[in-house]
Image (spheres, grey):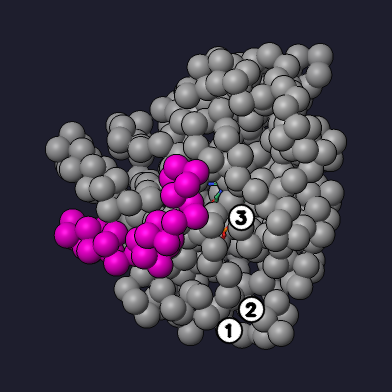
């Protein structure tokens, strides 16, 4: 059995964090059920206006208007409250907030006010994160992809706020969604998780006894053991949770993953400025054939996109396309996956409870047969 994971005041018996998955794969159902099993369930704070459309102002196509509606406070508050209800007081509930979103500071505060146990933040360096939670007792966990980023965050937080991260997540380039690397680096040996790990562990431990969590391509009980034996304190996993009954994604998303082959999972340029790992679907095929699918900026969702300027260049709006996927639109949506998504067909649809049993070595892993 594994050792419990302690992050600030949060302590959970199972050292697994279910990674935040936006838009809409990890809301109250997935996060709540993961927490119920004694791990950390993470709610995604992006695009919450899609979860509770009746609470927000939308255009005639159903798209939330402006960042106040797309990353909506009331919707996030309800999701966190519902996740906590489902957890029945077990585990912990974190909130994943992309550092690149418009209104980042406001959304961090919304999450803290709503009672998040921890805030996990990547896709950009969350250098100002502590500023937004002043007065709230919430653990802060940045996601990084290098030792340099650890140093910069710790140095800046120590100097400005006299505080250090409560844990750090190192995410390698096999993860789902945005990658903290250049496109070519994602395929280079020296940038793989295994090779980044020791340098980052050394840097983290220079700053004190900060727990280090690893992510990106972690798949099995053996993988988890591998990193825990080498000094990691926990793992963050996302892709394996998509084909659980409780994952908040629509059925079509799960079915798509159950059919995905290795070559169907590719990296694309995203308006956020990082490579984005997705599954080849009709919209992606059109995009790769030169079709520009940008339909104007309504949500103003991420800062680096510059109100649609980058979206126009790469040919799609990230909020709209992830929103279509959440609505189950196979033709128009963009469907994110980690590099291991093609292994899910061996797992099939299972419950969170069974997946946690598999990952903690209590049940046999059907994907390793
Ligand atoms: C569908 C999907 C959506 C994701 N969305 C986000 C997100 O909104 N913010 C974020 O920080 N990470 C996001 N991630 C990354 C995960 O939180 C996680 O760290 C990563 O996928 C771990 O690798 P794995 O999927 O191989 O387990 C996403 C991953 C997936 C598969």
Q: Nearer the viewer, mark 1 or mark 3?
A: 3
Residue sitting at x 81%, y 14%: 60
Of residue 239 and residue 131, the one placed in the foreground of this image is 239
Q: Earlier in the sequence, mark 2 or mark 3?
A: 3
The magenta segment is: 181-209
Q: Residue 361: which numbered mark, if any?
A: 1
Secondary structure mostly seen in magenta is helix
Image height of 215 relative to 346, above or below: above
Q: Is residue 85 left or right of residue 255?
A: left
Query: Does residue 159 show up magenta in the picture?
Result: no
Ligand 1 within 8 Å of disc 2? The answer is no
Among the two numbered marks 1 and 3 on one chain, the one whose residue lies closer to the N terminus: 3
In front here: 352 or 286? 286
Mark 2 Cα within 10 Å, few/some/many (few <14, many 20+)?
some
Q: Which residue is mark 2?
A: 358
Q: Can residue 86 be spotted in the picture?
A: no
Circles 1 and 3: CB distance less than 8 Å? no
Q: Residue at x 47, y 24 (%)?
A: 304
**Residue 356: image x %, image y %?**
62, 72
Q: Are marks 2 and 3 in contact (CB under 8 Å)?
A: no
Q: Residue at x 29, y 67 (%)?
A: 198
Q: Which residue is tagged 3?
A: 338
CB-based contact (under 8 Å), mark 2 and mark 1: yes
Q: CA distance from mark 2 to mark 1?
A: 5 Å
Q: Secondary structure at mark 2?
A: helix
Circle 3 Cα neighbour tier, 10 Å, few/some/many (<14 / 14–19 / ≥20): many
* Left or right relative to 341: residue 182: left
Residue 312: x and y, percent?
Answer: 63, 18
**Residue 117: x, y in percent?**
45, 50
**What residue sits 47% from the left and 65% below the top?**
235
Q: Can you tell me whether the CB of the residue at mark 3 lies under 8 Å from the nearest atom of ligand 1? A: yes
């Amino acid at each position: 059995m594994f050792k419990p994971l302690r992050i600030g005041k949060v302590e959970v018996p199972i050292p697994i964090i279910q990674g935040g998955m936006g838009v809409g794969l990890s809301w109250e159902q997935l996060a709540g059920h993961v927490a119920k099993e004694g791990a950390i369930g993470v709610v995604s704070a992006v695009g919450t206006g899609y979860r509770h459309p009746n609470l927000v102002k939308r255009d005639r196509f159903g798209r939330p208007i402006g960042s106040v509606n797309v990353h909506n406070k009331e919707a996030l508050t309800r999701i966190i409250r519902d996740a906590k209800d489902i957890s029945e007081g077990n585990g912990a509930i974190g909130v994943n907030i992309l550092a690149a979103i418009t209104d980042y500071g406001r959304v961090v505060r919304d999450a803290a006010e709503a009672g998040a146990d921890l805030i996990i933040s990547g896709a950009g360096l969350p250098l100002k994160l502590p500023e937004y939670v002043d007065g709230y007792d919430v653990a802060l966990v940045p996601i990084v992809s290098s030792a340099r980023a650890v140093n910069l965050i710790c140095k800046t937080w120590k100097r400005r706020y006299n505080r250090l991260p409560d844990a750090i997540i190192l995410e390698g380039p096999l993860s789902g969604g945005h990658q903290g690397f250049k496109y070519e680096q994602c395929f280079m040996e020296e940038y793989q998780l295994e090779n980044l790990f020791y340098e980052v562990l050394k840097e983290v431990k220079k700053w004190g006894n900060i727990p280090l969590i690893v992510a990106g391509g972690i798949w099995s009980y053996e993988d988890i053991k591998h990193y825990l034996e080498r000094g990691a304190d926990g793992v963050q996993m996302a892709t394996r949770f998509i084909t659980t009954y409780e994952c908040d994604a629509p059925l079509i998303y799960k079915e798509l993953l159950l059919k995905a082959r290795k070559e169907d999972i590719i990296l694309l340029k995203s308006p956020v400025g990082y490579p984005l790992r997705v599954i080849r679907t009709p919209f992606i095929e059109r995009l790769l054939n030169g079709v520009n699918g940008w339909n104007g900026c309504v949500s103003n969702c991420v800062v680096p996109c510059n109100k649609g300027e980058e979206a126009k260049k790469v040919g799609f709006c990230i909020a709209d396309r992830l929103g279509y996927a959440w609505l189950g639109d196979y033709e128009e949506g963009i469907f994110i996956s980690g590099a291991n998504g093609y292994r899910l067909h061996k797992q099939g649809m299972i419950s969170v409870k069974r997946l946690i049993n598999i990952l903690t070595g209590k049940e046999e892993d059907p994907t390793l047969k």
